[in-house]
Every structure is written in C-alpha cells, then in structure tokens.
Amino acid sequence: MTVQPQWHGGLAVHAGGSKLPAPMAPVRILPAPNGAIYGGPANNTPPSEYLADATRRLSDTAATIIDYTQGGIYYDGAYQDEVARCARQAGSYWIADEVVTGAGRAGRWFAFQGAQSRPDIVTLGKSLGGGAAAVAAVVVSKDIVERLKGTSWQNYGTLRGHPISMAAVSAYLKIITDDKILEHVQNLEKLFVRRLLAIAQKHPSVQRVAGQGLHWTVELHGPDWRDWHADTTEVPIASRVAERALEAGAVIGTSGEQTSLFLAPPLVISEREAALLLDALDYGLDIADKEHG
C-alpha cells in the first residue's frame, strides 16, 4: 500500500536472464495529503475523514509505505499518525522510506520524527554516505527483531559492509552532529518558506509549492505530473525553466517531469548561496510566465 505507485510497487524477482517477471503482488493506493505552503486547499480535510476506509483496505496488505517527498507530497504529523494507526490496526507493517529525507534533509534525523508514531521499518540511503559513497541501510524496530529471532533470513548485497562506505557513514554522522547541521537546515527552512511564498505570488505560472527542511517542490500550471509519460518530443516547461535558472548559476532538478521543479541543495549550503539559488528560480520562472499567459 502506497500513495506513490510510480516509485513503489515494482516488486519483482528475476529468475535469471533479462525477462521482466510478472508482478508478485498488487499495489493499492491510499489517498495522499494535500498540504502546501502555496496552492493548497483553503480548508484541509482531517486525515481521519479521507482515510476512513484505510483500515479495511489494509486488512490483507503486507506493508504500507510512506515516502516523504516523492511526487512533491510532504506528510504532516496528523496524516502519518493516522496511517500508522490504520496500518497497526490492520496488521500491516509500516515502512518509512527515508532514502531522501533521512539523516538531516528534513531538519531532523528522520522525517517521521515530525509525528508521534514510529515505523516498523526504515529505509535509508543517498545522504547516509554524505554523497561520498554509495550506501544504503534498513533499520528495523525492536518488535521486528523479536519476530526474527529463531528464523532464517539473509541480507543480500554484493558490497554490503564495505569499509570505505562504512567510513563515509561514520564521517557524515559525525559532521551532522559536530557542525550542528540539523539546526542549520531548520534555520534555512524559514528562508525557503519566506522566499518561495514571495516567488509563487509573483509568478502566475506557479500552481503549488510544498516542502520541508531543504527539499522543496514547485509545481507549474499544466498537465498533472501523474499523467506525464515523457512520450512527446517537446522539451517540458520544467526543463526549460531549469535551463534558464542554470544561466543564473543554479542547478534545479526536474526528475524529467513536465511541470515539477525540485530544490534539494546540499545541507551545508550557506544562506548567501541559498539566496542565489532562489534568485535563479525566480529568474527561470519568467519563461514559464510567458507561456502561461
């Protein structure tokens, strides 16, 4: 069960060769929250209302995944706690996908710490090695550990436990603590909220802005990103905005999407550099405004 089938649900086992196997299990979709600092609904419906059927839908679901950034969807504490409650009630394991947000990007060690509930399983990667080494990790709760006792299982990975990767993880975690990176991200979040609101209000091409810490999504008016299949020869408007922003000296991601822009700078970015990044976004959006009319 996920709110992001485009990223989650590719459960498959390769039985040799390169043929794609049939899916092992169906993936169901939960309603997603619609929180945003710009372009969100005037009155947010409580999660308990639009997730009223979640427990029933989770009754035969092995796991429920919450990904804290994909698709420009960012979860508040009330939503997470309600999903966690429904999953536990249904006997479905709750997995917090913190590959993007874990280890600092949300302004705390884990994005799930923005709520009271705690997951059964946490996935980590990307920033865990400080960008210096390819590394990932799976963290399980004490309850899961107890359930694994007396059973047989194996962690697959050709390069698991590589000493260089482990050294990178140790160094990264030390820097996060010693240099007070979490506090730095929290302070910069205030700058991003203030500037992104002003930018959205200035540019009519902007439909929605959402994010937390140092991960932000700017959605432009146009086709819904869920219907984008990258099957046209026309360069997407988001890519053209990013190209113009590059002229101003900043790299802004699009993930190849048609109308979505992603801002995810290094956690050590200075306030001056952050201002330059936001200035570049402001500059790049001029081209979208002309097309939006």
Image (tube, grey):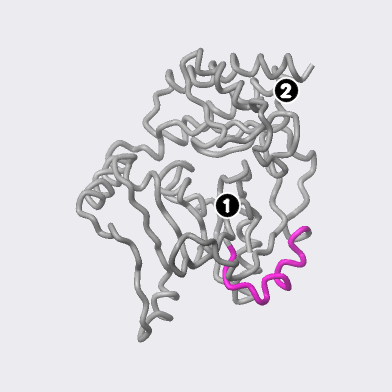
Name above or below for residue 37 compared with residue 79.
Answer: above
* Dot 2 amino acid type: Ser
Mark 1 touching mark 2, by CB under 8 A? Answer: no
Q: Name the residue nearer the viewer: 19 or 255.
A: 19
Which residue is rendered at x = 66% and y = 33% of the image? 258
Q: Quadrant of residue 94?
A: bottom right
Q: Please report the bounds of the magenta region as a residue range.
A: 50-64
Q: Would you call the spot at circle 2 few (<14 residues within 10 Å), some (14-19), or many (20 or more)?
A: many
Above/below status of 256 relative to 18: above
Report, in whole angstroms, how far the alpha carbon at label 1 lies from the one at label 2. 27 Å
Which residue occupies 64% across, 18% down? 285
User: Where does residue 105 sit, x and y in percent of width and height?
Assistant: 45, 41
Residue assigned mark 1:
7
Residue under label 2: 205
Tell me if 277 is positioned left or right of 41 in this view: left
> Is residue 56 shown in magenta?
yes
Judged by depth in the image, the label closer to the viewer, 1 or 2, is: 1
Earlier sequence position, callout 1 versus callout 2: 1
Instruction: Tell me: residue 15, above or below residue 245.
Output: below
Q: Is residue 7 left or right of residue 234?
A: left
Q: Secondary structure at mark 2?
A: loop
> Percent position (x, y) of residue 18?
47, 60
Rendered residue at 54%/18% (across/down)? 245
Q: Quadrant of the C terminus?
A: top right
